[in-house]
Image (cartoon, rainbow, N blue to C red):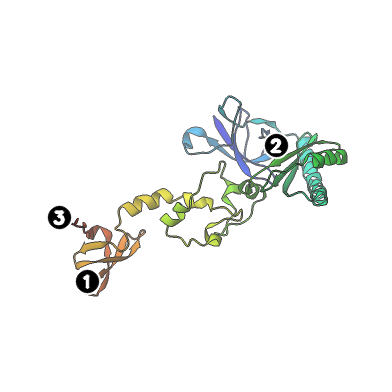
Amino acid sequence: MEIVKVCIPEESSKYYDSNGIELHVGDWCVVEGEYSADIGEVLWKYETPSLPSLSPCTWRDEEGTTSMFKVLRRATETERQRAEDNRIKARQAFKICQKKIAGRNLPMKLSMSKYTLDGERIIFYFISEQRVDFRRLVSDLAKTFRKRIELIHIGVRDEAAMIGGCGHCGRPLCCKTFIQDFQSVAIRMAKNQDMNLAPEKISGICGRLLCCLQYENDWYIEAQKRMPKLRARVKTPRGLGVVKEVNLFKETVRVHLDRGEIVELEANNISPLKRQRRRSGSSF
């Protein structure tokens, strides 16, 4: 199977099965989508045997079988122009929908609007912390645009992936550039990396924990197993002491010796002291 990476304008880049269609970098093609067909530009081509860890754009059908989205065909110049016109109309539809949401005082935030490739449907994506009855809104939008209207409730992480932005590192958001499926992230991962637990330090623009916390979490767990714990009593070539600081990257430890001196030693030269259990006696 040949896999191609396709960039859909104003959205994200995803991986697709080329479906036997000969494509080259820079070609435009029509691809399957979760809600409608999309059109995008080919960025890269891959052979699947060389990409065992690739996470393609997949979907799950009614029987629970996971399949990969496919390229449908090469895009014609007419389809490319139609897609560009649809993007312009989608921006206008977004503003109109925003006004109607505000006019009805609905507890929802509009994230994105999109015309399907055939121009027959308009899809509006929104986020909300509660269930919203938007039936009247849909009816109003259908009368305004004379198109089939779909409103889709998404999460804040999905919104960040759609809109994009820059992370704390100064680079484009991972969810916008390459993440295909969101993985669970726990506060324990930040603790494993000894990070500042202030919400603004470990949260992304979506307000959820940073996706990148999971990238090196396994390495930190394995590295910590090889190192003594903080405040542990240890035996060193310089004498007994207590661990004051651990450097996982250099694999060194700063130890406060019993005689008052603080030294930095390699972790493999230090051995933890086993605690002696107290013997419980019985009195008669």
Residue 208, how many percent across, how many down?
A: 57, 52
Question: N-terminal of the two: label 1 or label 2?
Answer: 2
Residue located 52% across and 34% down the image: 47
Residue 277, how many percent across, how many down?
A: 19, 55
The quadrant where residue 119 appears: top right
Residue 96, how many percent across, how many down?
A: 83, 48
Above or below: residue 192 compared with residue 38: below
The quadrant where residue 245 appears: bottom left
Report the amino acid beneath label 2.
Asp
Above or below: residue 190 compared with residue 263: above
Determine the CA span between mark 2 and mark 3.
77 Å
Q: Circle 1 is placed at which residue position?
A: 258
Q: Circle 2 is placed at which residue position?
A: 38
Report the amino acid beneath label 1.
Asp
Question: N-terminal of the two: label 2 or label 3?
Answer: 2
Mark 1: give few (<14), some (14-19) or many (20+) Cα within 10 Å.
Answer: few
Q: How many marks?
A: 3
Question: N-terminal of the two: label 3 or label 1?
Answer: 1
Residue 86, how many percent across, how many down?
A: 79, 41
Q: Nearer the viewer, mark 1 or mark 2?
A: 1
Q: Is residue 19 left or right of residue 260?
A: right
- Looking at the rendered structure, the secondary structure element under dot 2 is strand
Outermost residue to the bottom: 260
Q: Nearer the viewer, mark 2 or mark 3?
A: 3
Disc on res. 281: 3
Q: Is residue 86 left or right of residue 164?
A: right
Mark 2: give few (<14), some (14-19) or many (20+) Cα within 10 Å.
Answer: many
Above or below: residue 116 compared with residue 245: above
Q: Quadrant of the C terminus?
A: bottom left
Report the amino acid beneath label 3.
Gly
Front-lying residue, 161 or 26: 161
- Looking at the rendered structure, the secondary structure element under dot 1 is loop
